[in-house]
Amino acid sequence: MEERKIVKFKKEEFAIKEKIKEILGKGKVSKVRIEYTPIGEKIVVTTDKPGLVIGRKGEKIEELTLMLKNNFKFENPRIDIEEIKNPNLDAQLIADDIALSLEKLGPLKFKVIAYKNLQRIMNAGALGAEIVLGGKLPSSRAKTWRFSQGYLRKVGDTAKVVERARAIANTRPGTVGVKVSILTPDAKLADLIKLNPEVIERLKINSSMVDSPQEKEETKTKRKRK
């Protein structure tokens, strides 16, 4: 019984998030977080375009508040806007941008769109990135295309810090799935080894003091001649 309540609760949360994204539009919202407080529900919308999300004189906020009250029976919903400082490192925004570009320009230019966004991510300082497109690109048969650059772990504890997102592009030939994975520059890597500059200098000095095998052989030859 308890499991059913949890599943129902999670399904309702998912429906709320999807409805908010639908009202605000694709490419404007990265994440929607719901926090439950004693005075009511707090909905945090993460976006890089706070002005468009708020709307003129807060009309979008009012629309969302009414929707939450009428559709989901929220008593006192409060909507907060959280601005993204670097949208080029947000996986969801990049995935939505790729989906919108595919819908606008067509699936024939998928390589240009993918490489352009991949370069965008790496120029923003990402340690690694991967874009995967799946669908009728460009032939009539569905195929998966992968574009990647930099360092990106897929298994183990390091893979947990990789930011992942998905989006769907509805093109004329059919639906195209978009997956974006980004390893941000501030990600904490458990297997990352940092060498102390002083240690590196000592190793260089020690290595220069040790003769190479070739030098040792030359020294032996000179001694024999003497």
Image (cartoon, rainbow, N blue to C red):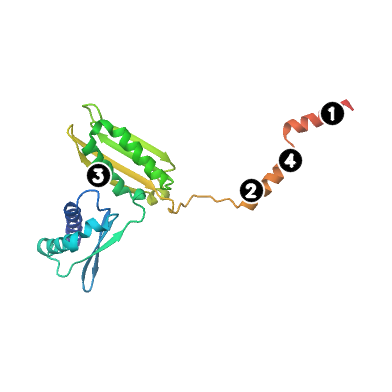
Q: Position of residue 79 (x, y in %)?
A: 22, 64
Q: Position of residue 199 (x, y in %)?
A: 64, 51
Quarter where residue 16 is shown: bottom left
Residue 169 drawn above or below residue 84: above
Badge 1 is on which residue?
222
Q: Identify the residue shown where x is 31% and y is 59%.
A: 83
Badge 3 is on which residue?
167
Residue type pointed to by label 1: Lys
The residue furthest left is 70
Element on which disc 1 rests: helix
Badge 2 is on which residue?
200
Marks 4/1 in contact by CB < 8 Å: the verdict is: no
Closer to the N terminus: mark 2 or mark 1? 2
* Spatial separation of the CA atoms under disc 4 and disc 1: 18 Å
Element on which disc 4 rests: loop
Residue 36 drawn above or below residue 181: below
Q: Identify the residue shown where x is 29% and y is 37%.
A: 133
Residue type pointed to by label 2: Ile
Of residues 162 and 92, the one drawn nearer to the viewer in this rendering: 92
Of residues 203 and 99, the one drawn nearer to the viewer in this rendering: 99
> Can you say which quadrant of the picture contains the C terminus?
top right
Closer to the N terminus: mark 4 or mark 1? 4
Residue type pointed to by label 4: Val
Closer to the N terminus: mark 2 or mark 4? 2
* Spatial separation of the CA atoms under disc 3 and disc 2: 45 Å
Residue type pointed to by label 3: Ala
